[in-house]
Image (tube, helix red, strand yellow):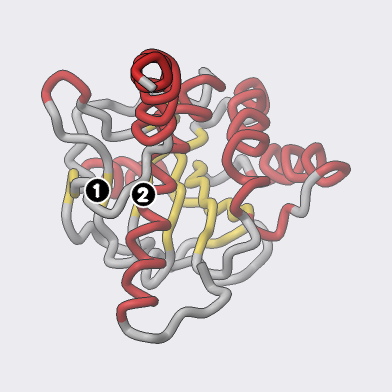
Amino acid sequence: MKKNIVLFVLFVLPIVAYLFFASGVNSFTKLPVITPKIADFGNWKSLNGKKVSLDKKITVLGFSGADLLNNRGNYFNLNEKIYKRYHGFEDLQFVVLCPLGTEKEAQKLVDALKPFTDVSGWNFIFASPDEIKTFYKQLNLKGKLKDDLGTSYVYIIDKERNVRGRKEKKDYKEGYDTFHPSELSNEMLDDFKIILYEYRAALKKNHNATKQL
């Protein structure tokens, strides 16, 4: 009997603990707000002609910059690690804010994704350089856009237009680097699960659980 208990403590318990903490989602976790109540998008043109808004949507937001095609690998990483797994949820959208004049490059990127992806959840919207700078500034982030108005980082925005992330000093994270697939598979996926868990829990609490999330 003692031998069985010792074996359990030495081998089984550590595995159970690892699985619990590695899941990134539990009922006692909420992803902190980095910046509350950011402004919605302007009346900006989108690639497919539809109006795109942050309201009542969980948004993965990126900034392409003018060199969109040369950075297409970042979008392929995001597509594989996050988009394909979750894009079927009605309350989720992926939005990339691009400088005016990059519409053809954005369409080429979408066309490159089409053979192996349902691209209906990808949204590319276009604004002037000044509009992009103004919009990014009000996010109040530590990171900065590059000179071409782009960044490899993407940001999680909740349905109330709050930027969400990690606020601990040793593990501060306001965005997720699409250049590194491992960061998307680990930190971003963990945090994304927390956001989805929050809304699922709220739906269940209100006895209104639907297929939306």
Task: Give 51 or 102, whichever is nearer the viewer.
Answer: 51
Query: What x and y, as percent, mark residue 37?
Result: 19, 61
The residue at the point 84 percent across, 42 percent down is 116
Report whether residue 152 is seen: no
Q: Which residue is mark 2?
A: 194
The residue at the point 65 percent across, 61 percent down is 88
Report whether residue 85 is seen: yes
Q: Secondary structure at mark 2?
A: helix
Quarter-wise, where is residue 49 in the image? bottom right
- C-alpha gap between disc 1 and disc 2: 7 Å
Q: Which residue is mark 1?
A: 29
Quarter-wise, where is residue 54 in the image? bottom left
Q: Secondary structure at mark 1?
A: loop
Query: What x and y, as percent, mark residue 112?
Result: 81, 37
The residue at the point 54 percent across, 52 percent down is 94
Whether the residues at callouts 1 and 2 have beta carbons within 8 Å, the answer is yes
Q: Amino acid at mark 1?
A: Thr
Q: Residue at the right extreme?
A: 115
Task: Give 178 or 205, whichever is nearer the viewer.
Answer: 205
For residue 128, above or below residue 147? below
The reply, left or right, for residue 164 in relation to residue 132 is left
Q: Amino acid at mark 2?
A: Ile
Graded by Cα atoms within 10 Å as few (under 14), some (14 to 19) or many (20 or more), the crowding at tag 1 reads few
Query: What x and y, as percent, mark residue 82?
Result: 57, 41
Graded by Cα atoms within 10 Å as few (under 14), some (14 to 19) or many (20 or more), the crowding at tag 2 reads many
> Which of the image's four quarters has the N terminus?
top left
Task: Give 184 or 102, whichever is nearer the viewer.
Answer: 184
The residue at the point 38 percent across, 86 percent down is 207
Query: What x and y, as percent, mark residue 187?
Result: 40, 29
